[in-house]
Amino acid sequence: MSTASVPLTVPYTLNPDYRVAVGLAALGLAVMPWSWPVGAVCEAMTAFLAWQTTTLRWTFTETAVVLTRNGQPIRTFPYAEWQDWYLFWPRVPVVLFFREVRSIHFVPVLFDPAALTCYLNYYCPVTGAR
């Protein structure tokens, strides 16, 4: 996953990425013949993640990441409060973990993982061994 081609412009809104939803849909369809309840749960989660991917956006500003739903800000995460972050399974990014001063978050990667990594490395550089 190369981040060299991502321009560092501010504010920058990450583009949606449906790979997590599509992967879960494929898993649900593959499991359906053996266990239709598990497959149905996977498909329901797929619909939820696809809807979230369509409506939620992360925008990087000079001071914070702003989470918006349909263009309306719903939460701000100031960089000054970020202590650490980690992208699980970097080759196939699925979950972003980040820790703030008062809370921790696990977020499905519903947006461009290359741009996400690039901006997080710039605004919230990791300071320590992983």
Image (cartoon, rainbow, N blue to C red):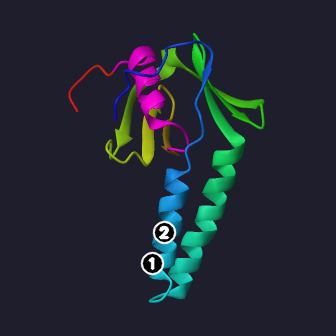
- Image quarter for residue 4? top left
- Specify the amino acid type for callout 2: Ala
Q: Residue at x 59, y 78 (%)?
A: 40
Q: Nearer the viewer, residue 51 or 2?
A: 2
Q: Residue at x 48, y 69 (%)?
A: 26
Q: How many marks?
A: 2
Q: Position of residue 106 (x, y in %)?
A: 48, 44
- Image quarter for residue 90? top left
Q: Residue at x 59, y 71 (%)?
A: 43
Query: How far is mark 2 from mark 1, CA to CA?
Result: 6 Å
Vertically, is 66 above or below 109? Answer: above
Q: Secondary structure at mark 2?
A: helix
Query: Badge 1: how crowded within 10 Å, few (<14), some, or many (20+)?
Result: few
Question: Quadrant where the C terminus lies?
Answer: top left
Q: Secondary structure at mark 1?
A: helix
Query: Badge 2: how crowded within 10 Å, few (<14), some, or many (20+)?
Result: some
Marks 1 and 2: in contact by CB < 8 Å?
A: yes
Vertically, is 84 above or below 41? Answer: above
Residue labelled with disc 1 = 30
Q: Main secondary structure of the magenta part?
A: helix
Q: Position of residue 71 (x, y in %)?
A: 77, 31
In the displayed structure image, the side of residue 106 where residue 12 appears, left or right: right
- Segment colored magenta: 109-125
Residue labelled with disc 2 = 26
